[in-house]
Image (spheres, grey):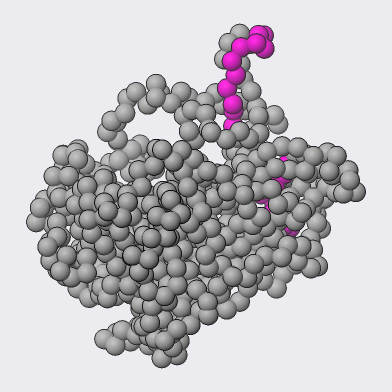
Amino acid sequence: MQAMSCTGPLIVDDCGSTPYDYDDERILLFQDHFKKSDDDMIHGLTSSAKFAWTGETSGLLLNGKGVATGHTAAWCPAAEANGYFGSRRFTWASVSDDNDDSGDHEMGYDSQIQPSADCTLPVIDVEPGKTYRFRFIGSTSLSVVAMGFEDHHDLTIVQVDGSEYNAPVPVNHIQLAGGQRFDVLFRTKTTEELHASGNREFYFLQFETRDRPETYRGYAVLRYNPNADIPPAPPQPVVNLPTEMAGWMEYTFQPLDPDQSRAPTSDEVTRRVILTAQQKLDKATGRVVFQLSQMPWVDAEHQKPVLVDIYERGHAAIPDYIAAILNGGWDPKTKFFPALVDEVLEIVIQNTGSLLEEAHGVVESHPFHAHGQHYYDVGSGPGLYDAETNNAKLAEMDYKPIKRDTTLLFRYPPGKVEPGAPAGWRAWRMRVDNPGVWMMHCHILAHMIMGEFCFCGKLWRRLTRVLTGMQSIWVVGDADDIISMPLTVSQQYLTYGGSVYGNATHDPEMVHFFDDAEEQCPAVVVVEPDC
């Protein structure tokens, strides 16, 4: 259910120095494991005869390694750690004379360390008295995860969703939803502190799923001695993690340099779009569906990806902006949300209680994600969104939000309201400046496909019938804004299997627009690790 053929972290480094100092970094990539196959899960979710949920997560993987429900990790002799993934290591190569240690040095990268295949806990190796940049990556397809380190509470969030650096925020635990990323400065214990603790060689990272009928609890090993054996999970929890997720870190993250903030004010907002999230039974098909703003996909008009259609038909493929304004934000003919360049949008996602008879007002949490450009998150709360009240709160706090791209539509207590009643909201502001065709959607794939059928052509290959539930397509700008290079150049990019894709018989043929890339960001000297 991860909708991918390969997976792994993609880290984009700054060309210059970072505003925060740290000695090294580690990657913590979390994923779900399900017992069913993709085909079985998709069939159950889309069946008109009998709806069948995917089932709950049977295990959380950390960097590809985990222990499934009902299984127990074993003791293991010392083994390699999981979590480097070519991480930044202090391996140095002189860029001056080979024998001159006084010259400048470049930081190198180790090769990926493959995880072992045994049934043991994942391991993160650290050294005493160091500051690490821990990159938490939520690659889960369902789970929202709470996590904390045993006897390590010195965590500071410095960057969220790969966007601008924020003013430091100290925390003692992390909450991570699908699609979210948090960069955290983590200070390890000194040699003296380890000695005072009885020369402990490892501690545990404890992580637990939230807002689901069943809770999965897993562990990883924070290891100070790389030669130490890998222990099994502790018999009892080592961290008391909060059970309530709603409201975590709300109205907290602000830019590291407030004077540089470009967050739109309430006075600058030109249009507000309310995306009402509903779960209901589609009487026409008998399927359980999610909808945004009561938008059904019932036609089979979209034989081509939207961007391809715009390139080929130009303005005729652009949704009707006026019709959309009169229809809650989406064009009733194309089912797309149009936006104009330089608009300042306030997008509110309004959660509601389920309309299903058997669910009767149950509320789900949804990590909502926007493609194309980051937005400024301006908060969330229970019940119905009230712009005046929220704006007053922002003004009273003198709150300047940071850019985000994935924020959680919380399942506020008690987690159940009257069917269809307001159950919580999330608000974004966005100064629209990136023309194109972009998705905005819940990051839980099962929720995305619990909708009506949309036939999207050969681009999808296996899933020719794409279900569009809790997702929306936004067309930003007119055709002139979007078509940034002529069709003669872009054609092979827009054709599945075109020459720019490359395969076993030919290399990709690509048009290069940035010949000065090496001058903008000098290449890193790669140092091969020791055997």
Asked where in the image residue 306 lies, by quadrant, the reply is bottom left
On screen, residue 121 above or below 84: below
| Among the 4 quarters of the image, the one containing residue 530 | top right
Q: Is residue 101 magenta?
A: yes
- Count of numbered badges drawn on the protein: 0
- Residue plotted at (20% across, 58% down): 338
Q: Which residues, given as a range, are shown in magenta?
A: 99-126
Q: Is residue 276 magenta?
A: no
Q: Residue at x 37, y 66 (%)?
A: 389
- Secondary structure mainly formed by the magenta segment: loop
The percent coordinates of residue 335 (x first, y second) are 21, 67
Q: Nearer the viewer, residue 106 or 373?
A: 373
Quadrant the C terminus occupies: top right
In percent of width and height, residue 106 lies at: 57, 22
Using the image as rendered, state which of residue 46 and residue 197 is in the foreground: 197
Looking at the image, which is closer to me, 500 or 204?
Answer: 204
> Residue 254: horizontal and vertical position, in percent?
47, 47
